[in-house]
Image (cartoon, grey):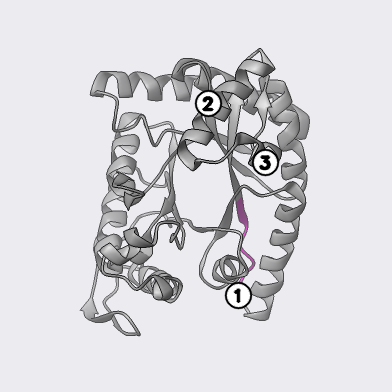
Amino acid sequence: MITVGIDVHESVLAFGPEDRRALFRRIADAGLDHVTVADHVSFHGGTGFDGMVSAAAALASDDRLDVWISVYQLALRHPLAVARQLASLAQIGPGRLVFGVGVGGEDRSEVSNCGVDPSARGRRLDESLRVLRALESGEAIDHRGEFFELANARIVPAPSARIPFVVGGSSPAAMRRTAAYADGWLAIFCSARRFGTAVSQIAEEAGRLGRRVPGWYGLNVWCGLDRDPQSAREVLGRKMEALYRLPYARFEHLAPAGHPKAVADWLVPYVEAGCRHITLVANAAGWQQAVDCTGEVRQRLIEACG
């Protein structure tokens, strides 16, 4: 089964309650399967989106949509506190949450200002994932690791449905981390060929570790959507250049722009490579158009791939 959703990290907290509910109604009515929210503490001068707060708002806005946190800066938090937040979110939206994590580090000051050594964030993330998995049972645990010590720690009530943990990133470490600790992998700025290779690498590493092969594979993709391809390209280029401070030409081969059919056609090779869950970071003339065009991409993609 293919699922398609839309990124709402900028609007879920910026919109007032009535507008936010209208946004989520339109997303669900468009046939989309999920929304994605982001997470940063203080990124490049202070920008941030609290992933847990955003997820709570999204889960409470419409019962028809799954919510991805994509990706959460887990290494910057204590895993016991995160386990409590996840358990609470699971009560708000049972079975509707996907928890994506990443190593972060694009802004090293964000990491160090949180009291974390940037060079240790990968090891800290691995340990945090082990702790979260142990706590999800609802049973008391003891843990003594490099970064955390817990004695008779317990989080109840445990989630009634298992929360999928997925790892974002394209490095060899992300592949290893997915195989060792996660239920799946989430890509961004990744070619379809690279996506297929990563799926094979994760399966091979999981087998080497004697672990069940992860079965959840997703993609976040920036795109521009408009009936006029040039307008789609212009709106996407402006947004990406403002955020990344690099020419859109640097991203063009991994960030499609055009008619919804063209974007759906661009995504078909990813589905053929094993991708089953897609989020569009959709840029259009307005949010209504972004939602409606994303719904059309979903329909055309399902028609093409079954």
The image shows a total of numbered marks equal to 3
> Is residue 165 or residue 93 the one in the foreground?
165
Magenta stretch? 211-217
Q: Quadrant of the C terminus?
A: top right
Label 3 vs label 1: CA separation?
32 Å
Q: Position of residue 33 (x, y in %)?
A: 52, 33
Q: Nearer the viewer, mark 2 or mark 1?
A: 2
Q: Quadrant of the N terminus?
A: top right
Q: Residue at x 31, y 70 (%)?
A: 116
Q: Residue at x 70, y 24 (%)?
A: 300
Look at the image and say whether residue 215 sits in the magenta stretch: yes
Question: Badge 3 is on which residue?
Answer: 254
Label 3 vs label 2: CA separation?
15 Å
- By secondary structure, the bulk of the magenta-drawn segment is best described as loop
Question: Badge 1 is on which residue?
Answer: 211
126 with respect to 210 (left or right):
left
Q: What secondary structure is found at the residue carrying circle 1?
A: loop
Q: Residue at x 58, y 20 (%)?
A: 293
Q: What's the residue type where badge 2 is placed?
A: Asn
Q: Position of residue 174 (x, y in %)?
A: 56, 65
Q: Position of residue 32 (x, y in %)?
A: 53, 28
85 with respect to 193 (left or right):
left
The quarter of the picture where residue 232 lies is top right
Q: What's the residue type where badge 3 is placed?
A: Leu
